[in-house]
Amino acid sequence: MKLKLDGHSTALILEQTDDDDIHWSWFGPASLAEMATPAGFQRLPASPDQPVGPSLMPGHGRGFHGIAQIEAFCATTRRRVQLGQPELRQNGDALHIAARDDHLGLEVGTTFKFQGDALVITTTLNHTGQSPIDLIRAASALPPAPDWANEVVTHAGAWGREGYEARRSWTTGRVEQLGRGGRPGFDGGPTLSLTEAGAGENRGRWLTAHLAWSGPFRMAVEKATDGSAQILAERRFAPGEIRLEPGEELDLPAVMLTVSESGLNTIRRALNTAIRSMGRSLVRPVHFNTWEARYFDVTEAGCIALAQDAAGLGAERFVLDDGWFKGRRNDQTSLGDWTVDPVQFPNGLGPLITAVQQAGMEFGLWLEPEMVSPDSDVYRAHPDWVLGWPQEPLPTGRNQLVLDLALPAVADYLFESISALLDANEISYLKWDCNRDLYPAMRDGIERPGAQTKALYRLLDRIRSNYPVEIESCASGGGRIDAGIARHTDRFWASDATDAIDRLRIQRSTGLIMPHERLGAHVGPSPNPMTGRQIPMSFRVLTAFFGHFGIEADPGHFSPDEKAVLQRGIEFYKSHRNWMHEGQLVMASEPGDDPDVQLLVSDDGARAFARVMRIDTPKRPLPSRVRLAGLTADARYNLVEYALAGDPVEWPIGEYSGAGLMAEGLALDPGRALSGRLIYLERTA
Ligand code: GLA
């Protein structure tokens, strides 16, 4: 039996053969589905008499030594889980496979469903037996890796320096990306791609898997000696973390799988579109965030002055970052005591919020609810609320400890503290931070990082369903950006790096998963506090232009010329954001290329912005041709340059075909280091 599922232009074919194995016959362009791999395993020399291979839901014990669907055992009988033959069926627009261990009563069911061109795979374990089952690991998805794949691409990075592409050749064995820190981390998180050598943004084959999960994970590819290969995506369990009791069910995190014959841009579009459909569609106001303007030095008078300056530049939302709550003057105290500091804000937040609103802005507030400072009232009252080793010193990180969110008393305390702030003040936005990993994610000697992740999702939902607030997810910048938390939040702080050169790289890599309008991109100070680089305002504005625009610097330090550039950039942004925020980000250059060339193309293809950013002095004095991407080949476009300074504001460039702009390009290189150009394209035919 062969069953086929169609996405927008991708198809999946699963086939169940007479020997009852389920084969993944095709996952690729629907137009090429006739190339599906025939089902069945070949009998190889010196191998099992009943041929085995990686059918779906594989197990060990019959001669298959690849990755099994599940590794688990019954704690009472010590018997290992062994799934029987799986069954395949179709139910409307979904395919299901299910297998069962009849002795232990464990059922495993996987559902495949397209969301556009992203195949979403969900797996559930259901314990119908009598004795508890301990899980060692369980795959959310275990599809075969295609034969053409000979490179693995992930990302590498650390705090403030996220987003470096990491490519390695892969011909045999296993390549694994592990997240042990309890948050996905700064190194790309649960995303892994396979390519063929030479594949890039606009060429070559790619297959990308992303796990919608904000806790520990394992993403791997493994090639067996017979040449077959598997892709593994799963939540990582700590030893002893999961014991399924009779009657219990466990949902494993969803996996999003996408494939492209024509470069990474196709993958980006499919993943962005699928993640967009999980979230709320919002008009995104221009932010002003106090952090890099004031750090911990926030006071009522200082913030009112900042708010007035920010509004004058065009900001529409004022976010009061760290430093506003009781006793918080540095990063050593007070997390957990979510009441307004009586010294810095003697009249509460009311006067500041009124001033913010009078200046025409909304008000947002920073919180770090999952954390507690040892030097805080709440910790002194409830030292038993934190995660840690029993009877051992508690390891701090940024001087803080982690609350056990899975404890109902903790979740209630946080909900009530946040509710009190939201009830007493007109706060429409929360910046929700998480500034350390979970080590150990332990209570009573049992590690439970997954319970922490699920409790976090519940708390976010509880707040969003009781209050009309938007929530930004931040984890020291890009430490927790994934499709799991995207369902429960509205925006991400992409990185603590506000250096515009670093940001070009970071927003490109994070934008592979997360739609650009959900990525906070702020104009920071110059010289940049982290890198010391002095970067012109126009370059900083253009970098922020392709994300959710904001300002993260003291406007009092901007020169009149800088202010004028910023104001003009914000005006452009406001008049185009509606289509930009529903459009697609397309890379016309490869990571690390100079100039960096990106386009934002409207959903209907009728208009686009092309942004060309020159980082270093070009090697050649004559301008090089810049080729665009993501346009419609047989359409014609009128091109106009938008100038951030001087007159006129708009410079006509000319009218050209999409094919010409993509194949030949134009002399659009800005030519000077640290300069950029913004070109508006409108379709004329
Ligand atoms: C983290 C965030 C920053 C800022 C600080 C405040 O580093 O990423 O944006 O909010 O915390 O302490």
Image: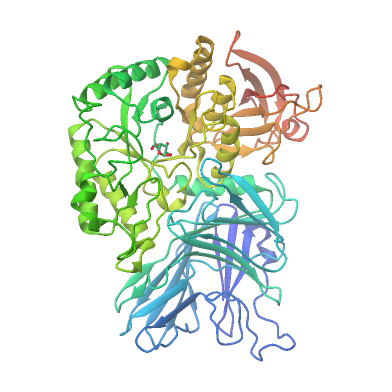
Q: Residue furthest top?
A: 647
Q: In the figure, 307 relative to 266: above or below?
A: above
* Colour approach in the figure: rainbow
Q: Residue 107 in the image: x percent, y percent?
A: 40, 78
Q: Nearer the viewer, residue 47 or 537?
A: 537
Q: How many marks?
A: 0
Q: Quadrant of residue 104?
A: bottom left
Q: Is residue 402 left or right of residue 624?
A: left
* Residue 606 or residue 465, whichever sits in front: 465
Ligand 1 in which quarter? top left
Q: Can residue 605 be seen in the rendering of this structure?
A: no
**Picture coordinates of residue 4 (x, y %)?**
56, 66
Residue lying at the far bottom of the rendered structure? 49
Image position of 549 with respect to 208: above or below? above
What residue is at 66 percent from the left and 89 percent from the top? 48
Quarter that holds the C terminus: top right
Residue sitting at x 54%, y 27%: 528
**Percent coordinates x, y for residue 13 in the rendering:** 59, 67
User: In what quadrant of the picture does the N terminus appear?
Assistant: bottom right
Q: Position of residue 372 (x, y in %)?
A: 29, 48
Picture quarter containing residue 28? bottom right
Q: Residue at x 70, y 28 (%)?
A: 616
Q: In this rendering, does residue 168 appear at all?
A: yes
Horizontal side of 182 relative to 572 (left or right) equals left
